[in-house]
């Protein structure tokens, strides 16, 4: 009798234990292909969605430029504190690097950029930028909210993570190549792979876009001061005219792409500014020109040729030229090249999450992104997340009318979190040989 009672008790206890375990948020026993949808449902729940929207709007009202993201960074840290996510700060001035999971290899990183642009917002709405001349016009406020959303999802399930997810909140994407500084400050220590997502108005809501290999061009800038000798416009032979020299320079620069580049290898050299002189009858002392270059290959060679063409054309015209390839501290960024395996993983994941037609294969884009520094250092994958819907038309990034479709935020959070989990599982099934280290 006593024995029978014991067995009945024991069986009941085991059943209760089983019920308890299965009601927890563990995914271990779940079908792996169903998990991303669960993450998305969670990210779309009013509790998480409203919280992400709140963060995005707070950041939108208080935009901060590159390496000045102190309040943005503070908000991120306070949210990570509330979640109980450990982090390193400061990393590259305002950067934050959070860690969720075992604290052991493998390490996989997710990245969001935090900076705004020096432009005036023209959208009239309740949460318009409160800072004159500064605006989140590239969606980086949304990127931060999506990565915090991913952190929340991952933290909810941290006991099931088979490694560590590194959350990289980086400063200064727009101008100063904050990614490069983050790498120099050790943000990628032991990290094996990295994923980045950018919101786009070019793709419908709930769809993603990417490609294997070169996705975005290497991007750089140049500024040159061409100096001659000013004087009376009616007595040109007593002057050394920098206007003529600058004109030759502008035309000669066009030949770098049209005559020196394989027509099948896309490159751009654009002179977008030309300043000098303020009178009809005075030849100025100098002219300043400036512009941008884009290339998927031979980027530094193109930079060198731009420098050479400017200085030599100036010399031919008896002028001097000084060329700056980092005007106002604007760092060039290399091309963003997506790793083939990560691209395949990403494509499979979004199809599991959002359906067969949720992935759009895009052609290479001449725009630049400093995510390229991460993807140059370790295997990386950068993708676009659509936000276009029938309700309104969304302006292009860097427009004063730019808006974020906040309905895209749960997709970003769920894709981020699912990619990290899938990467870690994949690695766990294959084994990792990365060194163990303290966070
Ligand atoms: Zn931008
Ligand atoms: Zn951007």
Image: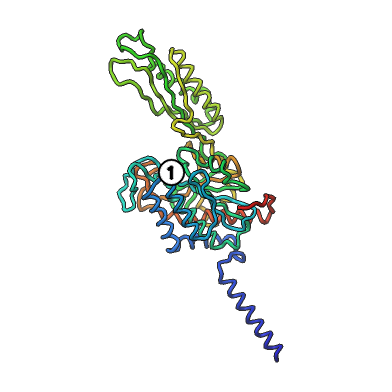
Residue 67 placement (x, y as % from top left)? 46, 42
241 w.r.t. 381: above or below: above
Q: Which of 66 and 392 is in front in this view?
A: 66
Kindly identify the residue that appears in the image at 47 percent across and 41 percent down. Answer: 173
Quarter of the image holding residue 27?
bottom right
Q: Is residue 28 above or below residue 184?
A: below
Residue 117: x %, y % from top left: 40, 41
Mark 1, ligand 1, within 8 Å: the answer is: no
Q: Name the residue under label 1.
A: 68
Residue 383 in sight here: yes
Q: In what quadrant of the picture does the N terminus appear?
A: bottom right
Residue 83 position in % (x across, y down): 50, 60
Horizontally, residue 269 falls left or right of residue 352, namely left
- Is residue 412 something one can see in this rendering? no
Check the image and tell me how it is coloured. Answer: rainbow
Residue found at x 46% / y 56%: 78
Foreground of the two, 239 or 195: 239
Mark 1 crowdedness (10 Å alpha carbons): few <14, some 14-19, many ≥20: some
Element assignment for label 1:
loop
Q: How many marks?
A: 1
Query: Horizontally, is 40 left or right of 242 in the view?
Result: right
Q: Residue furthest bottom?
A: 1
Residue 273 point in image, percent of width and height: 38, 27
Report ligand 1 position as a quadrant. Answer: top left
Relative to 186, does residue 261 appear above or below in the rendering?
above
Relative to 103, 232 lies left or right = left
The answer to whether 388 is drawn above or below residue 244 in the figure is: below
């Amino acid at each position: 009798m006593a024995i029978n009672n014991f067995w009945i008790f024991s069986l009941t206890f085991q059943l209760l234990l089983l019920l308890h375990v299965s009601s927890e948020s563990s995914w271990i026993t779940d079908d792996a292909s169903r998990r991303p949808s669960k993450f998305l449902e969670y990210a779309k729940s009013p509790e998480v969605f409203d919280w992400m929207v709140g963060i995005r709007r707070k950041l939108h009202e208080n935009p901060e430029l590159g390496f000045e993201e102190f309040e943005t960074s503070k908000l991120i840290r306070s949210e990570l504190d509330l979640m109980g996510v450990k982090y390193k700060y400061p990393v590259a001035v305002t950067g934050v690097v959070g860690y969720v999971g075992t604290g052991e290899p493998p390490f996989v990183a997710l990245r969001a950029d935090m900076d705004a642009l020096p432009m005036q917002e023209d959208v009239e709405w309740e949460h318009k930028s409160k800072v004159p001349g500064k605006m989140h016009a590239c969606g980086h406020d949304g990127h931060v909210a999506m990565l915090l959303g991913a952190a929340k999802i991952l933290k909810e399930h941290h006991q099931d993570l088979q490694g560590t997810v590194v959350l990289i909140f980086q400063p200064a994407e727009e101008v100063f190549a904050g990614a490069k500084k983050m790498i120099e400050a050790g943000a990628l220590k032991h990290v094996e792979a990295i994923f980045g997502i950018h919101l786009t108005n070019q793709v419908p809501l709930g769809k993603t876009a990417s490609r294997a290999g070169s996705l975005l061009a290497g991007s750089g800038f140049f500024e040159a001061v061409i100096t001659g000798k000013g004087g009376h416009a009616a007595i040109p032979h007593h002057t050394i005219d920098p206007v003529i020299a600058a004109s030759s320079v502008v035309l000669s620069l066009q030949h770098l792409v049209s005559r020196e580049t394989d027509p099948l290898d896309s490159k751009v050299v654009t002179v977008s500014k030309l300043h000098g002189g303020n009178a009809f009858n005075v030849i100025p002392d100098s002219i300043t020109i400036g512009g941008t270059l884009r290339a998927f290959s031979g980027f530094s060679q193109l930079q060198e040729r731009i420098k050479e063409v400017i200085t030599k054309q100036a010399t031919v015209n008896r002028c001097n030229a000084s060329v700056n390839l980092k005007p106002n501290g604007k760092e060039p960024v290399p091309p963003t090249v997506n790793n083939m395996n990560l691209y395949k993983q990403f494509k499979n994941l979004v199809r599991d999450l959002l359906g067969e037609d949720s992935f759009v294969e895009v052609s290479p884009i001449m725009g630049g992104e400093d995510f390229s520094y991460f993807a140059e250092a370790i295997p990386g994958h950068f993708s676009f997340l659509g936000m276009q819907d029938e309700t309104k038309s969304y302006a292009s990034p860097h427009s004063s009318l730019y808006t974020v479709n906040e309905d895209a935020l749960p997709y970003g959070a769920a894709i981020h979190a699912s990619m990290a989990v899938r990467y870690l599982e994949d690695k766990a099934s294959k084994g990792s040989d990365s060194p163990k280290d303290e966070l």
